[in-house]
Image: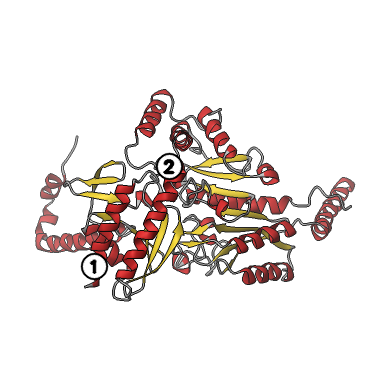
C-alpha cells in the first residue's frame, strides 16, 4: 500500500516535471512543420499532408483533417513565412506547448509549375529556423542530383539546409531514396528510431554508386548548364513566335517550364501535339509544359527537340 | 478431381431451367465488371504508348515509333536509357548479392553515403526507396528533433 502510494507520487512528480521542463525549454508536444502552397512532397499520408494542394487531399481526411502538424504559406513569401512562425509561437494550445519544428520547402517547386526558390525567402527561412531551434529541410527529390546545373538545388539559394531529401535521379531510374542530415540533425535518430527493409540494399546502392561515379568521371553539370541555357534560348524564340499560346519560361539547368497561356490550348494539348511530332514532354502544375530530359542530353538532341516543339505549337496554334 | 465450370453448370438441372435469366444476369455482371475494371484502370491516365526499348535520350514503342524523351521517367533517368555503366553495375551486383536487409553491413550503401556526404553539406545518409519515403523520414526526424529539443537542458 505504502509502496504504491510512493509510486503514485513519483509518477505525478515525473508528469509535473515534464510539464515544467517543456514550459521552460524548447521541448514541445505540438511540433509544427511549415510547407508551401502548391508544393509536392509525396503521396504517403505524412508527405501528402505536407503537400499543400487540396486536390490531392480530397477524400483522404479523417474528420476533414489530414495528418495534423502542418501549416502552409505562399512559396517565396517572406511576409507570410514570418507571420506564420509568429502565429505558431503565439497560439499555444491548452494541452501542451507548440513550436516550430521545421520549414520544409522544395528548392524549386516542380509539380507546382516550375517555380524557382527565391534566395531571400530561403535566407529568411534559415534565420527563423536558427532562431527557433527548428530544422530547415529542402526537398531535392526532383531538383537534386544535378538537375539544376549544381549538384543540389539549395546551392542556387545561398543557404545550407539541416536536412535534404533525394530520390529520382539518385538511382538513375532504379528506385532509391535518401534523407541526408547535417550536424546535430544527423544525430537525432538512433538505432531503431526509423527503418526500411529495402532501404539502401546492395542492388539499389550499386545503381546509386554507378550514377555517382558517372558524375565524378564526367563533367555532367557543365552539360546540364549549357543544355539548359540552350533550351531557355530556344524556348524564348518559339514563345515570341506564338505570343498568344506561350508565356513565361522558368527553371534552372535541365528543369525548364514554359507557360501555356491560352485557355483553348492547355498544356495537355501541347504535350499531345509534341508527342505527335515524336517528342515526349510532361505538364507541371495547371498551366506549364515541363522539359526534363536526361542530364546527358546532347546539343543536337536539344536542337531537334526545339524544332519538334516549334512544329507542335504551330500545329495547335493554327 | 478437377471439375470444370461448364461441366458443373450443365449437370445442374435447376440452373439450366433458368438459362435466359442467367444469361441476362451474366451479361449484367459483365457490364458491371467492365465498369469496375475501367475505374481501377484510371489510377493512371496513360497515353496509348507501350515503351519497348530505350537508348540514351530515345525511346521506341513496341510498334516501332521513336520518341525523343524529354520526360526521362519524370526527371529520373539522369543517365538516359540503357546506360552501359549502370547496366554493368546492376548486373554485377545482382550476380553477387542483391538484398540482405539492414541487419548486416552493405558496402555499396557506405560508398554511396560517403559520396553523397562528401558532395553536399550533409554528414549522414538514411536510405529508403522513394522520394515520398525520404520526405516521410524527414518529417519524422523533425518531429523527433522537436520532441528531444531542450531535454538535455537541466531546469529542475
Q: Position of residue B115 (x, y in %)?
A: 55, 35
Q: Is residue B49 left or right of residue A120?
A: left
Pointer 2 residue? A175
Q: Is residue B93 above or below residue A267?
A: above
Q: Is residue B98 above or below residue A310?
A: above
Q: Residues within 10 Å of mark 1 (few under 14, many from 20)?
A: some
Query: Which marked residue is nearer to the observer: mark 2 or mark 1?
Result: 1
Residue at 67%, 40% in the rendered image: A190
Q: Is residue A145 above or below residue A264?
A: above
Q: Position of residue A305 (x, y in %)?
A: 29, 54
Pointer 1 residue? A314
Q: Position of residue A189 (x, y in %)?
A: 65, 43
Do the residues at discs 2 and 1 belong to one chain?
yes
Q: How is the image coloured?
A: secondary structure
The numbered mark, 2 or 1, whose residue comes first in the sequence reads: 2
How many numbered badges does the structure rendering display? 2
Residue A207, visible in the rendered structure: yes
Q: Is residue B78 left or right of residue A216?
A: left
Q: Quadrant of the C terminus of chain A?
A: bottom left
In the image shown, does A9 or A24 lie closer to the viewer? A24
Residue at 55%, 54% in the rendered image: A156
Q: Position of residue B13 (x, y in %)?
A: 11, 53
Residue at 60%, 54% in the rendered image: A137
The answer to whether the residues at label 2 and label 1 have Cβ atoms under 8 Å apart is: no
Q: Is residue A311 above or below residue A90?
A: above
Chain ID of residue with mark 1? A
Residue B47: assigned label: none
Q: Residues within 10 Å of mark 2 (few under 14, many from 20)?
A: many
In the image shown, does A235 or A281 lie closer to the viewer? A235
Identify the element where label 1 is drawn: helix
Q: Quadrant of residue A55?
A: bottom left
Amino acid at each position: 500500500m505504502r509502496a504504491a502510494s510512493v509510486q503514485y507520487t513519483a509518477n505525478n512528480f515525473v508528469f509535473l516535471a515534464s510539464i515544467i521542463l517543456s514550459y521552460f525549454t524548447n521541448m514541445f508536444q505540438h511540433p509544427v512543420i511549415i510547407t508551401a502552397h502548391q508544393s509536392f512532397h509525396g503521396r504517403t499520408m505524412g508527405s501528402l499532408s505536407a503537400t499543400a494542394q487540396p486536390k490531392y487531399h480530397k477524400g483522404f481526411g479523417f474528420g476533414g483533417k489530414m495528418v495534423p502538424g502542418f501549416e502552409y504559406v505562399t512559396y517565396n513569401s517572406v511576409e507570410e513565412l514570418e507571420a506564420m512562425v509568429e502565429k505558431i509561437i503565439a497560439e499555444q494550445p491548452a494541452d501542451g506547448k507548440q513550436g516550430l519544428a521545421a520549414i520544409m520547402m522544395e528548392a524549386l517547386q516542380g509539380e507546382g509549375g516550375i517555380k524557382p526558390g527565391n534566395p531571400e525567402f530561403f535566407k529568411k527561412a534559415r534565420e527563423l529556423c536558427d532562431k527557433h531551434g527548428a530544422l530547415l529541410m529542402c526537398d531535392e527529390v526532383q531538383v537534386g542530383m544535378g538537375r539544376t546545373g549544381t549538384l543540389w538545388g539549395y546551392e542556387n539559394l545561398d543557404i545550407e539546409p539541416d536536412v535534404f531529401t533525394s530520390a529520382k535521379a539518385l538511382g538513375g531510374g532504379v528506385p532509391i531514396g535518401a534523407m541526408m542530415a547535417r550536424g546535430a540533425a544527423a544525430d537525432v535518430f538512433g538505432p531503431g528510431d526509423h527503418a526500411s527493409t529495402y532501404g539502401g540494399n546492395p542492388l539499389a546502392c550499386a545503381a546509386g554508386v554507378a550514377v555517382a561515379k558517372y558524375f565524378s568521371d564526367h563533367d555532367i553539370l557543365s552539360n546540364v548548364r549549357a543544355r539548359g541555357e540552350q533550351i531557355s534560348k530556344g524556348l524564348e524564340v518559339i514563345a515570341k513566335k506564338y505570343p498568344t499560346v506561350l508565356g513565361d519560361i522558368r527553371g534552372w539547368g535541365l528543369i525548364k517550364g514554359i507557360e501555356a497561356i491560352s485557355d483553348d490550348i492547355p498544356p495537355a494539348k501541347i504535350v499531345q501535339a509534341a508527342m505527335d511530332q515524336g517528342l515526349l514532354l510532361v505538364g507541371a502544375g495547371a498551366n506549364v509544359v515541363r522539359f526534363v530530359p536526361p542530364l546527358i542530353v546532347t546539343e543536337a538532341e536539344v536542337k531537334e527537340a526545339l524544332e519538334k516543339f516549334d512544329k507542335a505549337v504551330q500545329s495547335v496554334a493554327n | 478431381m478437377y471439375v470444370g465450370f461448364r461441366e458443373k453448370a450443365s449437370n445442374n438441372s435447376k440452373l439450366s431451367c433458368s438459362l435466359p435469366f442467367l444469361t441476362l444476369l451474366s451479361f449484367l455482371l459483365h457490364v458491371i465488371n467492365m465498369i469496375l475494371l475501367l475505374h481501377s484502370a484510371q489510377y493512371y491516365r496513360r497515353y496509348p504508348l507501350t515503351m519497348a526499348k530505350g537508348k540514351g535520350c530515345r525511346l521506341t514503342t513496341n510498334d516501332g515509333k521513336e520518341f525523343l524523351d524529354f520526360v526521362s521517367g519524370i526527371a529520373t533517368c539522369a543517365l538516359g536509357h540503357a546506360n552501359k555503366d549502370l547496366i554493368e553495375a546492376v548486373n554485377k551486383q545482382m550476380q553477387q548479392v542483391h538484398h540482405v536487409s539492414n541487419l548486416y553491413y552493405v558496402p555499396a550503401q557506405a560508398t554511396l553515403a560517403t559520396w553523397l556526404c562528401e558532395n553536399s553539406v550533409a554528414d549522414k545518409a538514411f536510405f529508403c526507396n522513394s522520394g515520398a519515403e525520404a520526405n516521410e523520414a524527414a518529417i519524422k526526424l523533425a518531429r523527433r528533433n522537436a520532441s528531444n529539443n531542450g531535454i538535455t537542458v537541466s531546469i529542475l
